[in-house]
Amino acid sequence: MRQEYADIKSRLGEPLWYDENGTPRYEPFQPRLCSDIYAKEAALLLIECQACGETFEVAVVRSPFSALIILGVLDSRTLAEDIESGSVHYGDPPAHDGCPAGPTMNCIDKAVLQYWRKREAAPWEWERIRGLEGEIEEEEEQ
């Protein structure tokens, strides 16, 4: 479950998107605005609350320090590989009014709206890769 951030939203209104920690963001999406300053990949996803169906734009990132440990196994797949396989996932949706159950449930990942990666030749610059954007296909069974 993610923080509600009612203090911020009561002053600024509904955000344009949420970062990977569920923090509301009010500037148009740019990968450099994500929380993980070491991120090498970033995507803006469209997700849906399982309970009420409300949609949100949210960021997911991948950095050398964000490898996932699942059941004791180091998972070092890239964000691009997760998108291609249909396994990219945000987790719990942002806290939202009028839906007490939704923020406690995993979201439904609907689409990759933007995908960015840092350029190898200029690692301080981001490049957008439109070929990985579009609807998220269900993960293939292994």
Image: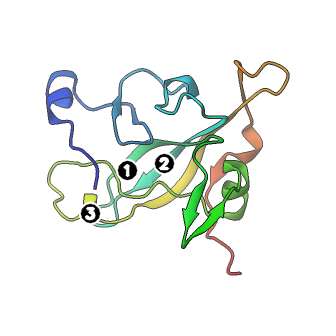
Identify the mark at residue 46; answer none if there is no mark. Answer: 2
Callout 2–callout 1 Cβ contact below 8 Å = yes
- 21 relative to 70, above or below: above
- 30 relative to 64, above or below: above
- C-alpha distance separating marks 3 and 1: 15 Å
Residue type at tag 1: Thr
Q: Which residue is drawn at 14% across and 54% down?
A: 98
Q: How crowded is mark 3: few (under 14 residues within 10 Å), some or many (20 or more)?
A: some
Q: Quadrant of residue 114?
A: top right
- C-alpha distance separating marks 3 and 2: 18 Å
- 116 relative to 47, above or below: above
Where in the figure is residue 17, as x and y percent of width and height? 40, 35
Q: In this view, does 141 lie to the left or right of 23?
A: right
Q: Nearer the N terminus, badge 2 or badge 1? A: 2
Where in the figure is residue 33, as x and y percent of width and height? 49, 24
Residue placed under numbered mark 3 in the picture? 104
Q: Nearer the N terminus, badge 3 or badge 2? A: 2
Residue type at tag 3: Thr
- 13 relative to 57, above or below: above
Where in the figure is residue 13, as x and y percent of width and height? 22, 27
* Pair 3/2: label in front: 3
